[in-house]
Amino acid sequence: MRHMPIIPRLASPRGAATALVLAALLIGPSTALGADEFPAGFSGYHTYAEVASAAKAVETAHPAIAKRFSLGKSYQGREIWAMKISDNVGTDEAEPEILYEGGHHADEHMGVELALRVMRWLTDGYGTTTRIRNIVNTREIWIIFLANPDGAEHDISGGKFHHWRKNRQPTPGTPYTGTDLNRNYGYRWGGGGRTSSNPQAITYRGTNAFSTPEARAVRDFLASRVIGGRQQIRVAVSFHESGRLVMWPYGYTYTDIPIDMTRADHLALKAIGKKMAASNGYRPIQASSLYITSGTTRDFLYGMYRIYSYTFELSVTDYPDDSRIASETSRNKEAVLYLAERAWCPLSVLGEQVRLARCGAFDDDLEVFRGWTYDPDGTDTATTGKFSRANPAATSSSGPKQLTDVPSGSRGFVTGGGAGSSANANDLDGRTSVRSPAIRLSTAPGQRLFFRYVLAHGANSTSADRLVASIESSNGTRTPLITLTGKPADVDGVWRSVAASVDAWAGQTIRIHFAAVDAGSNSLVEVEIDDVRITRGS
Ligand SMILES: [Zn+2]
């Protein structure tokens, strides 16, 4: 059925949008938005309406573990359907979370089919397969089936393919329609490569980051999964087509480990990507090895939240007929399940030592915001050199004091990140403090608070200059656990690490509290902190 009049090429976008709204009001959304069918040979693919009803049917059949919901509306007013799959699905449990999503690109219909298959594998398999039951019981899985419903419907309008990739939002001030949703996300938006500022281009990035309602809906959903300062989603895959590739971040640069990635993350992303590729037979590459992109979901998920995010490019060719759906989706089943299993601690793929160090109750390389609060008591006295999470500038005074290279990535807590006009222009004077989000310690023995630090000071320092790490119980009691003090000697900046047992708090919910104090009369004190962890004993 023909659904919408083609917008005249020179009509103003505002006029077109108004006409669309009027049409919807006059003849009802179902008629105005149309309901198209795939061409002959492709009817095994799900239309927008069929995606919605398939998800509804699964929710009805599995109400204890499946819940359909909408992320919000597309430009033309379609719901962007999603599903949560987990035991106790109505409760937000403290379980690692996984995101699978398809349909950012309207003409990549196989990705939508894989998203639907993931839903079926997890729900149909729940009662029959121990492995899937374990995943559903210990994880919260989110599936976005079709992020670009307007584009997908347009692509099949009139029962033929239109090779339409973008959404259906007119670009203001131009006669052109459509933004590439997978260039519209707000991490390094607007970069080069296959990312265009030309509204006519199929890779048009939009007027600004998140100019599309579809990308905003996904962005807002992701933000809603930040609980207590921590992003709950650990791993994600975006399903695209074609090329049979497994791709990890980044797409914006050819560099393997740029400033906004840690070496450990790179190694784990690559190891997990290769493992998945070994099972689905796709080629594992860093995304930029295909071509440079910016503003993608994959880069946003990792760059913004450190979600271990992948892109799968399904199929050998574009528009494979529906006889290919079963084999192309099923070859991804092992990869999908494997990634869900890895979600509890993706870094553990790097081996036993990394598992013990990085998979405890808390792990923060301080590269992204993870819920710390500065001056939690409101009693700090420092006017300069207050803690901030920063990429520190180097300072020097009778030798290096503040070091510019942090142990992991590019950021740490620093007392005054800038260099200033002299070494002590931005150093600490007084007291500054920062407190972690709540941390639930396990009951197992052998857990330790670990962190790396620099404590540098001038020759006039005393033991009153100090860095104190305390454990704060849920009742607010704060117990100093590690105290590092100055002395009357010139001490240059060196990164060191320290650890102490937190067995006294096993099974409790605690917070880590750091206080740095320069109590002397304007002595030079620089403190830096990185890699704050609760490590495991076993
Ligand atoms: Zn794509």
Image (tube, helix red, strand yellow):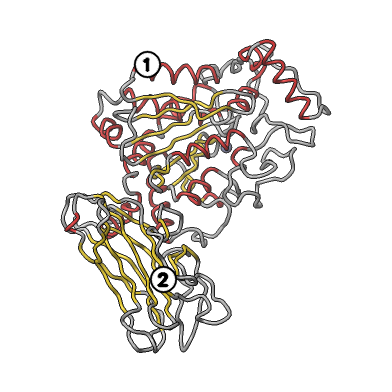
Residue 474, compared with residue 525, is above or below; it is above
Residue nearest the viewer, comparing 415 with 225: 415
User: Helix or strand or loop: what does disc 1 sit on?
Assistant: helix
Residue nearest the viewer, comparing 416 with 522: 522
**Amino acid at the residue labelled 2:** Glu
Q: Give the quadrant of ligand 1.
A: top right
Task: State the image coordinates of residue 524 (x, y, percent, origin top left).
Answer: 44, 82
Q: Do the numbered discs 2 and 1 sit on residues whose CB atoms are within 8 Å?
A: no
Residue nearest the viewer, comparing 138 with 467: 467
Tell me if I can see residue 285 in this picture.
no
User: Helix or strand or loop: what does disc 2 sit on?
Assistant: strand
Instruction: State the residue at coordinates (57%, 49%).
Output: 187
| Residue for badge 1 | 60
- Name which of mark 2 and mark 1 comes first in the sequence: 1
**Amino acid at the residue labelled 1:** Thr
| Residue for badge 2 | 528
Residue nearest the viewer, comparing 219 with 118: 219
